[in-house]
Amino acid sequence: MPVLEPPALRHENPFRILMQDLADERAATVPYPPGETRFSLARTKRFIDEPLPLLLEGYERYGPIFTLRILHSRVVFMLGPEANHYIAVSHATNFRWRESHFRDLIALLGDGLLTTDDPYHKRSRQIMLPAFHRERIASSIGVMLEETERALEQWTPGERIDLYGWTRRLATRVAMKALFGIDPDGETARSIDAAALFEQALWFYASGYQFRFLRGPRTPWAQLQEASKRLNRMLYGEIARRRATGERGEDVLSLLLDAEDEAGERLTDMQIRDETMTLLFAGHDTTTSTVAFMFYELARHPHLADELVAEQRALLRDGRPSGEQLMGGELAQLEMTLEETLRKYPPAWIGPRKSVEAFEFGGHTVPANAYVDYSSWASHHLPDVFDEPEAFRPERFAVQARKRIPKGAYIPFGGGSRTCIGMRFGQLEVRTIATLIAQRYTLELPSDFALTYRQMPTISPREGLPMTVRLRSEKARSQGERVGERVGVQ
Ligand code: HEM
C-alpha cells in the first residue's frame, strides 16, 4: 500500500489548537509530572528569552522529568542521558513530531522529513537517504571550498562584519548548489534573496507566543506567508524546469524527481517542494549558528584558534583540506572544537514531541496527548553529566575522555530513526568554513559584546555576531606553530 499523505493536523487555527490543548489536559487519565503549572506570562516570556536557565532550574528542583506551563499548555520536559534515549530511541514510537508545539513550522516547511511521522516519514527517509551517503557528501567539498573562498573575498582587514549574517548567506548558497544543483547566481535564484527570505519567515518563530496568534496584514504570520510564497516560486520554478528539460545531477532534487516507492508511485511537485524547503531550511540555519558560536568561543580563547592553525599547517597541503581529511577526523583539534561548540550551543536545541499513549518515566506518569520535549541544550549543561558545563573545553572530546560520556548524554544531532539526516553535510560544511577562516583571519569581538540568544526556532546570537576582521599575522602563525609543538601536532 503506498503511503501518500501524512495525517491532517487536528487543527490549524491557533484558537482551536488552544481549545484542543485545554481539552486534552482535562481528558488526562493520569497525573502530569510535578512542576510549575500555574499560568504565568513571566515564565512564558522567560522560556522564549532564556530557556536554558529555566530548564536547568527545573532539573535541579524536580529531577529529569518535570512540567512547566508555557502560555496555556502544560509541557513535560525530559532531560539527561536516560530521558534522551527514552524519547529518541527506546520509546520513539510513542512520540509524534507532527502535533508538537513546533507544528507552526509546517506553515513554512509543509510535510517534509522534519514535520512528519512514520509511516510517511519512514518512506521519505528511505527515498532521501542515498543522497546523504558518505561519498556523495564528500563530493560536496568542492562547492563548499569554492563558495567559502568567494565569500571570504568580501572581507577587508580592519572592517567589522556580522559573522552570523555572512554565514547565513554563504550557507544558503552552499545548500542551493550542493543539495539542489540550483545555481545561486542563475536567473531563478538571483531574482530572490533566499537568505533574507528565510530570516523574514523565521522571524515568526522568534516573536512572542501571543503575537503568533495574530493573523492579518503586517503580523509575523503575514510576513512568514509572504516569504514562503517567494521561496516557493523559486522551488516550484526549478522543479518545473527540471521536469521540462529532464536535466539531472547528483543532487537531492534530481533524486526526488525520479524517486518511486515500492508501489511505483512518484512524488508530486508539492511533496518535492516540501522536502526541498525542509532541507534548505535545516541545511543552512543550523550550520550558520554553529559557525557563529564557534568563532565566538575562539575569539574568547585565542590559543584554541592558534591550535587549529598549527594543526592545519602540519597537515594540510596548500591550506586546502580534502573531503576525506575533513570527514575522517584527521584534523583532531578541529573535530574537538566542533564537538564542544555543538555541546555548548546545539542549534536544534529542543526535540518537540507529543505523546501517543500515557507512559511512566523516572517514577512519574505522563498522560497521552501531552507535549513532551527533550532538550540537547539543557542536557549538555547538566553539571552531574558534564563537569563545569559553562566552560568551553574541546579536550572533553579527546579520544579517551569521549569514551566516558554516557550514552544519550551528547545529542546535538538527535537520535534514533530521526537522527539528523544532514549530519555529515553539516559537519563537513562547518569544518570547511572554519578551516578557511581560521587560516587567514583572526576574528575579534567588540569589547562590550554580551551574548544573548534568540530562538527561531534554532538558537542563534540575538543581535547577530559583530566581529572585527584581522589578518592572521606571521607572528600569530609562528605562535601557532609553537602551540602545535606543545599539543603534539607533528
Ligand atoms: C550543525 C548542523 C546541524 C545540526 C546541529 C542539526 C541538528 C538536528 C537535530 C537535533 C535533529 C533532530 C530533531 C528532533 O529530534 O526533533 C535534526 C533533524 C534533521 N536535520 Fe539536522 N542538523 C544540522 C544540519 C543539517 C543539515 C545540513 C541538513 C540538511 C542538509 C539537516 C536536515 C535535517 C532534517 C531533514 C532533519 C529531520 C530528520 C528526520 O526527522 O528524519 N540538518 N537535525
Image (spheres, helix red, strand yellow):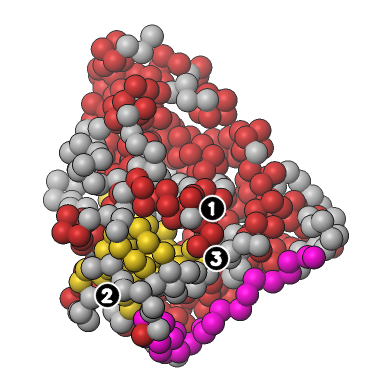
Q: Which residues are magenta?
A: 1-25
- Mark number for residue 370? none
Q: Nearer the viewer, residue 110 or 437?
A: 110
Q: Nearer the viewer, residue 336 or 224?
A: 336
- Mark number for residue 115? 3
Per the image, label 3 sits on a secondary structure element best described as: loop
Residue 297 coordinates in the image, percent (x, y): 26, 39
Q: Nearer the viewer, mark 1 or mark 3?
A: 1
Q: Residue at x 25, y 32 (%)?
A: 393
Q: Nearer the viewer, residue 116 or 268?
A: 116
Residue 10 coordinates in the image, percent (x, y): 54, 82
Q: Looking at the picture, which amino acid does disc 2 mark? A: Arg
Q: Residue at x 70, y 47 (%)?
A: 251
Residue 62 coordinates in the image, percent (x, y): 20, 60
**Picture quarter with the C terminus:** top left
Q: Are marks 2 and 3 in contact (CB under 8 Å)?
A: no
Per the image, label 1 sits on a secondary structure element best described as: helix
Q: Quadrant of residue 137?
A: top right
Distance (Cα) linking label 2 and label 1: 26 Å
Q: Which residue matches tag 1?
A: 418
**Picture quarter with the N terminus:** bottom right
Q: Which residue matches tag 2?
A: 69
